[in-house]
Amino acid sequence: MTTSPKVPTIAFANLKGGVGKSTITLQTAYYLSQKIGFADDKKLLVVDFDPQGNTSTRMLQRTDIEDAGGTRSYQLFNETLDTIKPVLTPCGADLIYATQNDTVLDDIELLSMDVFVNPMEHLTRLAESGKYAAILIDCPPSRSRKLIAALACATDIIVPVEVSGFAKDALTGIMKSIETAEQVNPDVRLTGVIINKFASRSHRHVHEKNLLKEALGDLLFEQTLSFRTPLDEANSLAIPIWSMGKGSARAAAAEIKAVCEEIIRRTGLKMNKPVPPKKKSVRKAKS
Ligand SMILES: Nc1ncnc2c1ncn2[C@@H]1O[C@H](COP(=O)(O)OP(=O)(O)OP(=O)(O)O)[C@@H](O)[C@H]1O
Ligand SMILES: [Mg+2]
């Protein structure tokens, strides 16, 4: 049996759409590459398995990326792929990209189910080059060959959720996909669940958060991400949240930083400088 890449490979996944998978992938990529950096001059690789191509177009800072060259994520589903050439992005991370509305990547669903093992084989080979300290994978919001492929590549799965009565259903859905991925990658683990778009002053949100904590225990990230408009703006502008000066942007940046540090601690990523030990959740200003 093939083994999964030894390089920590983090898939941000949820069958539900709009919960923040791409936002957290993007801002984590910025944080890890620019703010902190990896030990031994290693790099970050980001892989976009979502045919919407949101993470790719933002990382490359333009929407028309058909001509970006290098390897596209749909090619990872080919059984044979001689050389894999991620493209370098302005933040310093490498990227295996999907174009905006990537129909070729979409059409992977028309192929036989077993194509889902091919990306794992190719990424394992790429990871063996020793160039990368970590791989982040942005997943599509559906149970698909692409999602199972991403989970089969992963060492760690992190699930962003919004607090709602359906958050637990979404987790049940992702657990079923993890079971399928485990058939080829027994080492994959659910590493944590991040509550996104949290409103600490909403009694309902606090109640739902407590229910999730009861159900998940330590799997629930200490740090939540509040709903903050500047984070949405930073995404649209394809910039790190900490480069926006405004008050509530600073609060959003502090939360993103704390989430990234928690990701580093939970996955054991080897960074350039030590990450402070666990501290109390930050929530600085009103959104
Ligand atoms: N904490 C937040 N505060 C404000 N806006 C947010 C926050 N998190 C995400 N958003 C916004 O919500 C929208 C959905 O987020 P995002 O695209 O990251 O979700 P997704 O899970 O990747 O969606 P999809 O399943 O469609 O890929 C985006 O417009 C994003 O900018
Ligand atoms: Mg997305």
Image (cartoon, helix red, strand yellow):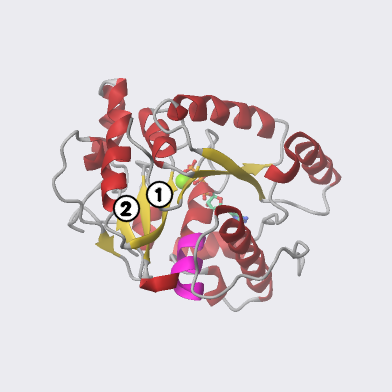
| Identity of the residue drawn at 19% across and 56% down | 70
Q: Quadrant of the N terminus?
A: top left
Q: Along the horizontal axis of the image, is 256 left or right of 63?
A: right
- Identify the secondary structure beneath mark 2: helix
Residue lying farthest left? 82
Residue type pointed to by label 2: Ala
Extreme bottom residue here? 245
Residue drawn at x 31%, y 26% is: 109
Is residue 129 shown above or below 120? below
238 and 223: which is toward the camera? 223
Magenta stretch secondary structure, dominant: helix
- Residue 175, given in percent of the width and then of the height, sits at 57, 28
Question: Where does the image place residue 151, in percent across and percent down from the top left?
Answer: 44, 37
Left or right of residue 120, residue 27 in this image = right
- Give the quarter of the image for residue 117: top left
Percent x, y of residue 60: 32, 63
Whether residue 216 is visible, yes or no, is yes
Q: Nearer the viewer, residue 180 or 94?
A: 180
Magenta segment, which residues? 27-38
**Which label was assigned to residue 204?**
none
Q: Earlier in the sequence, mark 1 or mark 2?
A: 1
Q: Tag 1's secondary structure?
A: loop
Q: Tag on residue 127?
A: 2
The reply to whether callout 1 and callout 2 are in contact (CB within 8 Å) is yes
The residue that mark 1 highlights is 6
